[in-house]
Image (spheres, helix red, strand yellow):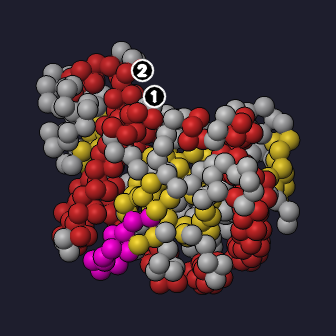
Amino acid sequence: MFQLICKDGHARRGTFTTPHGTVQTPVFMNVGTQAAIKGALSAEDLETIGCQVELSNTYHLHVRPGDELIRDLGGLHKFMTWDRPILTDSGGFQIFSLAQLRKITEEGVAFNCHVDGRHIFMGPEESMRIQANLGSDIAMAFDECIKIPSPYDYVKNSCDRTYRWLQRCKTALADYTGRDDAVNPGQVLFGINQGTIFQDLRIEHMKKIADLDLAGYAIGGLAVGETTQEMYDTIAAVEPYMPTDKPRYLMGVGTPGNIIESVARGVDFFDCVMPARNGRHGHLFTWSGVINIKNEKYQRDEQPIDPQCDCPVCRRYSRAYLRHLFKAEEMLAMRFAVMHNLYFYNTLMQRIRTAIEAGEYEAFRKSYTSVLDMRI
């Protein structure tokens, strides 16, 4: 399913084939948690801005409208009219970040729903059942996202339990996709490496989950409080133990600079709410740095958001107009800003792929890592 085309240092250029199309990697997955991008972008818009993979969340779609309803309506692809690949997160991160009261056992996690307070239990089998109902192309394993910092012994025990959960996920998903009424028989499972910033635990856990021969592997539990250097050091420590013939996914990361640096350390897949969230607050990514479109200096600025960008917004509208929309609190402001930022991220990945193919990735890295994260 994954084909490595070429490498430039540790940076990898490849393809990953799914039932709904082939993904060119490295790739940024556009986050549509509840089957929609926050900022009023449609499936048609995602095609326009170059999105390859849409990411939705198991927990949120289970809560509303309900995964069984989505199954009955033909699965998530049909529900949101998106015919390209979809990855669904397992719901684990949301459980551990949103639930006020939760109880972790070997079976799974019992907690109260953040929307209406009702009691919910989710374990490996429940997560796989929900994701099978959704019919995504990539299902993420159910795991515990451990807070940083946490005691070493707790992290070790959690990693061991997450491994046992992963074994159950593999068995359960194979059962669901093997049924005659499976929404997406080609759905595959990605395992998740945990261990916070304890490198020995990360490596030990990665070795164990690699033996399960899954379709792909993610590094989870980062970008949640550790320093940027600790994140990079953790990726570098784990990467040698990740199968070279499977895609590597760094969950929840990050800034353009984070992505460029992580590609240099061998990562293939990324996702982050940052481009959409920042866009909704008027923080826009450009090839010269990050601008705050609400600033007064843009009041009479007739330039596009980024003169180097050819997104639908930059081709037609000025900074002055977009600033006006934000100041007037028009919904169109968020739509335009999110569209631009996601287009920027998807274009960034295209330029990364081109640089790797040309054997010029190190020069690209030096030119853009610090520039793209800088506020101007």
- Residue at 63%, 52% in the rendered image: 184
Q: Give SS at disc 2.
A: helix
- Residue at image location 18% in from the left, 63% down from the top: 367
Alpha carbon of mark 1 to alpha carbon of mark 2: how far?
8 Å
Extent of the magenta region: 4-16
Q: Is residue 275 above or below residue 180?
A: above
Residue 363 in the image: x percent, y percent?
Answer: 18, 70
Quarter of the figure with the C terminus: top left
Q: Are marks 1 and 2 in contact (CB under 8 Å)?
A: yes
The image position of residue 310, as x and y in percent, is 20, 39
Q: Residues within 10 Å of mark 1 (few under 14, many from 20)?
A: some
Amino acid type at image mark 1 = Ala
Residue 92: name its quadrant.
bottom right
Query: Dot 1 corresponds to which residue?
Result: 40
Mark 2, residue position: 331
Q: Position of residue 15 (x, y in %)?
A: 39, 65
Magenta segment's dominant SS is strand
